[in-house]
Amino acid sequence: MRKYAADRFRHLFNRSLLLLRHRHHHNHHPFPYSSSVSSLSPFSRSRFLSSTPFSMASDSPFPVTAQNINPKVLKCEYAVRGEVVTLAQNLQKDLQANPGSHPFDEILYCNIGNPQSLGQQPITFFREVLALCDHPAILDKSETQGLFSTDAIQRAWQIVDQIPGRATGAYSHSQGVKGLRDTIAAGIEERDGFPANPDDIFMTDGASPAVHNMMQLLIRSENDGILCPIPQYPLYSASIALHGGCLVPYYLDEATGWGLEIPELKKQLEAAKSKGINVRALVVINPGNPTGQVLGEANQRDIVEFCKQEGLVLLADEVYQENVYVPEKKFHSFKKVSRSMGYGENDITLVSFQSVSKGYHGECGKRGGYMEVTGFSAEVREQIYKVASVNLCSNISGQILASLVMSPPKVGDESYDSFMAEKENILASLARRAKVSLPRK
Amino acid sequence: MRKYAADRFRHLFNRSLLLLRHRHHHNHHPFPYSSSVSSLSPFSRSRFLSSTPFSMASDSPFPVTAQNINPKVLKCEYAVRGEVVTLAQNLQKDLQANPGSHPFDEILYCNIGNPQSLGQQPITFFREVLALCDHPAILDKSETQGLFSTDAIQRAWQIVDQIPGRATGAYSHSQGVKGLRDTIAAGIEERDGFPANPDDIFMTDGASPAVHNMMQLLIRSENDGILCPIPQYPLYSASIALHGGCLVPYYLDEATGWGLEIPELKKQLEAAKSKGINVRALVVINPGNPTGQVLGEANQRDIVEFCKQEGLVLLADEVYQENVYVPEKKFHSFKKVSRSMGYGENDITLVSFQSVSKGYHGECGKRGGYMEVTGFSAEVREQIYKVASVNLCSNISGQILASLVMSPPKVGDESYDSFMAEKENILASLARRAKVSLPRK
């Protein structure tokens, strides 16, 4: 079957437009797209900012028009669900209506890491526990023993017992079920060798709402800047735009394997300051998205020191912590690195983002994740809590899954061998594909 | 067992502070609380708006302080997880440390409608389907027949077949799985007797993110106003504050059973306009939260006419559509009412919010919901879609549950009788408690 990958890079989505253009240029296929920027051109910034009442702004029969909505919304771009996907969907409609109308007959959506949509199977143990927690009434039925592994049943009992009233359909504490946060904190401690506090964990529907929470907290106006890597995961640019801040770019160096160089950070910070930007935070994505780069510990120490000296919040996107495919590299959390430097709660302001969507599990649709929030004053933490509270809580299945990801089956558990086999099989498959070289033209 | 209800009103949360004060005043219990407003008083608005670099703003060892965070976050109040809950949690700690230290020994959290935390059982059919979709590997096992009803198994097959690649762990379309939106649209059509378009459905993690999406779209500055009922559900005031808009209050009339009077709407709209506020939308909560009021159809027609004439978006919070406890009243959706007036897609801009957290199901922790978005131009819809896309999609279990709520078992299905018995039992219990009169002092 001839396949057409809208984006053959695994995560390098920002480059995919280039890829399509390239093909277009060489193959003369009539792909009718324009850049995200030019598609906004009819609406100049000055029109956005006008306070003309909407009823006078347009001949539209609708009271809401592109001329009178929040200009931050218009300004926001989100490539992974943007233009290329729309183009792909249009091509797919073409193919359905007129088979053979293109020199390919299938489209693979690689615009976002969504492994289960491409056939990756979920981890059996995780799904067993989720199913049992969704329907605890079957936990003590005899048929259940035949359908589910013993340790999944035990884990499900343990989890429902941690939920007040065993109510898996109740809103939880705004930060997530306390018992599940205990499990996550224990998992972080085991990973890092340093203490973790369940009260520092804020469970979220995937990592995206956690990132928004932080941007909402830190950004006061377009004079507040957030240092972000380029290439980046477009959530950051989208969230900064939606919250009306300023993205201060720093460039990863492709020549050194997408290295993160401190002089580059300093240069960009100074350039932003000279323009009157208050730089509030540094986003580091490690392992990198879309680059796949894994930071060395010495580099991480320099980054921590830089944030400390410059008074920056370190926003550590660590959602790919399981996705390291070379034996000579190892993931170290920024929390571990900063604690190993002797920096405690009062020395460095650090937020670590984790998600159930990535790693070997790839449970994107479950929308589970958390942020570990350290180095904020009590009064600011109250504000973070308040913003989390406005949406009440993240979904309980996602919370449960986040606890499972941070506490998978252990040696001796009935599911351990099959769990490890499933996990290693998935990671081996991802590693194999990560090493596929793309032909250079 | 002596019980102390932090809020004895079912939903009248805004009044609960008064209730506590009242008890305090009469009983001389030393409840140490202050109002949400006064707790913010150390931070004056002018300090919020200063652009002083954070490093100079404070002696705090932390770079982020209450003085240099987003002032909109500080301004936001969210009573249902705010002061009264904090007070209750402190009282609970007191009780654990010193049993008998208060004239009650248990606290019931009624600060938010969270029925399963208070013992309401989930609907069996819904949970069966969710469990099977979480672990589709058991769908064709023989033991499954003994544990799950036949129609739950059938429904789960139908749902996993609607999900591309049967991948219940994949990100869906940003608006939600198309097949599930088809089911919801069919449910709306059956409820209203008017067509519904699955492309108008945006599935969300509960109704709250849908409300935020709309506020984010409509609010450009503090000169943009949203008409909200008082008393209200505090999500609205919180979301308007977070997005930097202006809440334009209109007052429900307790004397007429919390009636929504058009002259009051007009008066408040004119007052806001005279202050230079662009009023963008009218929030109507029907059935009312916290009032329980159910609007009559004639009243609803007047509201639709008012929105049309004034060019307002009608934001219809219809999450309590199943919670009508008097036989002489009936829920009518605003979509049905406006269509029955002959107003179509181009005549009225209307958003209806629905949630799996309310009704008889009360599945708060599952975070499922949707908004039905009608009467927006194609270009504005694109913007709504883009904002929804930035968080990728709502959680799939919540999506599935939203489809089940809008398409429960039907006559002839194996689960129908037990489903109806569970549903009627819950609604009867809610109705009984809704009719409890509180003693007036």
Image (cartoon, coloured by chain):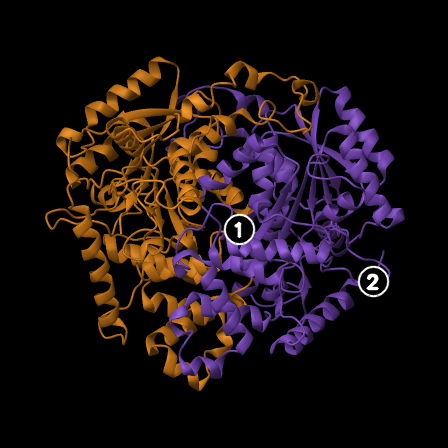
Chain colours: A purple, B orange
Residue at image mark 2:
A326
Of A181 and B103, the residue lying toward us? B103
Q: Mark 1 is on which residue type?
A: Asp
Q: CA distance from mark 2 to mark 1?
A: 30 Å
In the shown orientation, is residue B171 left or right of residue B369? Answer: right
Q: Mark 2 is on which residue type?
A: Val
What secondary structure is found at the residue carrying circle 1?
loop
Provide residue A58's location: percent of width, then percent of height: 43, 26
Give a yes or no on whether discs 2 and 1 share a subunit.
Answer: yes
| Dot 2 or dot 1, earlier in sequence | 1
Give the quarter of the image for residue B339.
Answer: top left
Give the quarter of the image for residue A418.
Answer: bottom right
Residue at image mark 1:
A205
What secondary structure is found at the residue carrying circle 2?
loop
Of B379 and B350, the residue lying toward us? B350
Name the quadrant of the N terminus of chain A. Answer: bottom right
For the question of whether residue A40 can be seen, the reply is: no
Q: Residue furthest left?
A: B328
Q: Chain of mark 1?
A: A
Q: Chain of mark 2?
A: A
